[in-house]
Image (cartoon, coloured by chain):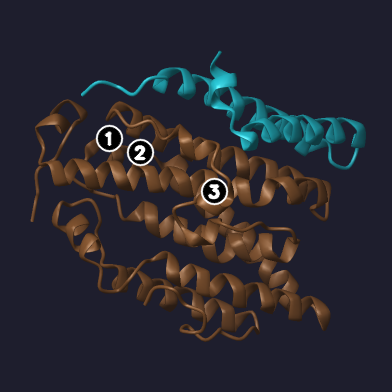
Chain colours: A cyan, B brown
Amino acid sequence: MPQAQNTEALDEHLKAVIQALHGAVSRAMPHVKDDPKLVDNAIRDCKEILDVVIEGNVSEWLH
Amino acid sequence: MFKDKIELKDFGKTDPEYQDLLKRVLAIQADCEIGGPNLYVKDMLPSAPTKVDQLVVARTAAEEIDHYRKMARLAGDLGVDVSYVLSWPNEKRYVEAFRGKITTWEHYAVFGFLIDRIGRYQLEEFIDCTYLPLDRVVKDSQVMREEEGHIDFGTNKTAEYAAKDGDYKERIQKAVDYWYVKGLDMFGKSESRRSERYRYWGLKRRTNREARQQYINEVNPLIEKMGLRVPDPLKGRLYL
């Protein structure tokens, strides 16, 4: 059974996306009370990343 | 009943109906996983009540994207590209519950409480299924643990709102009324031939009717315990 085209590439891309999101959340969560700027930056980063995912232009991600 | 255990390398030798059903269920599951973030990220990430809540929205979306990734990988290995659901507008989703938009925190909370719980039911269907790569994904404790986390967060937030007086309680009741019916419909028709074929091929465990009844038995006492009304289970239903 041949694998669908881009299976590996999409898998790797999404792994990187997920890692970046978890990284931003993990950095911010311990500093919710003492570093609002860091938290705001992390939320902004998450929004930027998630906006791209929601837009769903897969061909742009992979090329 | 089909009892063989199938690895990827043996998939091509299986019955065409088995292949079709497995490909179909993976595409639907992938769509449901990415359907959640598409419902709530745009409005809830900027407007969740606290910074912690905003971070929880982002983390929840990351986990659902990872569940999508795992389903997309399984489908891709079978030669099925399910990346088309990433660019689908919500109105095209396979499952009706994902065709709208979540714009209020009460709806976000109840979505976790009621709909993510159905996500857990859907994944449980695949435990010990005949396709071993799928069985392994759902037995990976991370996927189930993450789903449980979404359910717990939604349940706690719903209970918090329900414990408040007046307008808060009324708003959360309206959200429960909305999602409860959508949730019951997510199990599909009680008399479904396709559901029987899924069971025949060992790709699902329960009939639609059984899974829906178990869900009702689980959530109704929780809704009542929160001091909310259990909605009419028939009102507005699309699939009985």
Q: Is residue A59 above or below residue B203?
A: above
- Mark 1 vs mark 2, CA separation in Å: 6 Å
- Mark 2 vs mark 3, CA separation in Å: 19 Å
Q: Quadrant of the C terminus of chain B?
A: bottom left
Front-most of residues B47 and B83:
B83
| Secondary structure of the residue carrying numbered label 3 | helix
Question: In which chain is the residue bearing label 2?
Answer: B
Q: Is residue B186 left or right of residue A62?
A: left
Front-most of residues B118 and B84:
B84
Q: Position of residue B237 (x, y in %)?
A: 47, 77
Question: In which chain is the residue bearing label 1?
Answer: B
Q: Amino acid at mark 2?
A: Val
The residue identified by callout 2 is B137
| Secondary structure of the residue carrying numbered label 1 | helix
Do pointers 1 and 2 mark residues of a single chain? yes
Do pointers 2 and 3 mark residues of a single chain? yes
Q: Position of residue B216 (x, y in %)?
A: 43, 77
Q: Is residue B17 left or right of residue B170?
A: left
Of labels 2 and 3, the one closer to you: 3
Q: Is residue B115 left or right of residue B158?
A: left
Q: Is residue B145 in view?
A: no
| Secondary structure of the residue carrying numbered label 2 | helix
Q: Amino acid at mark 1?
A: Pro
Residue B158: quarter of image:
bottom right
The residue identified by callout 1 is B133
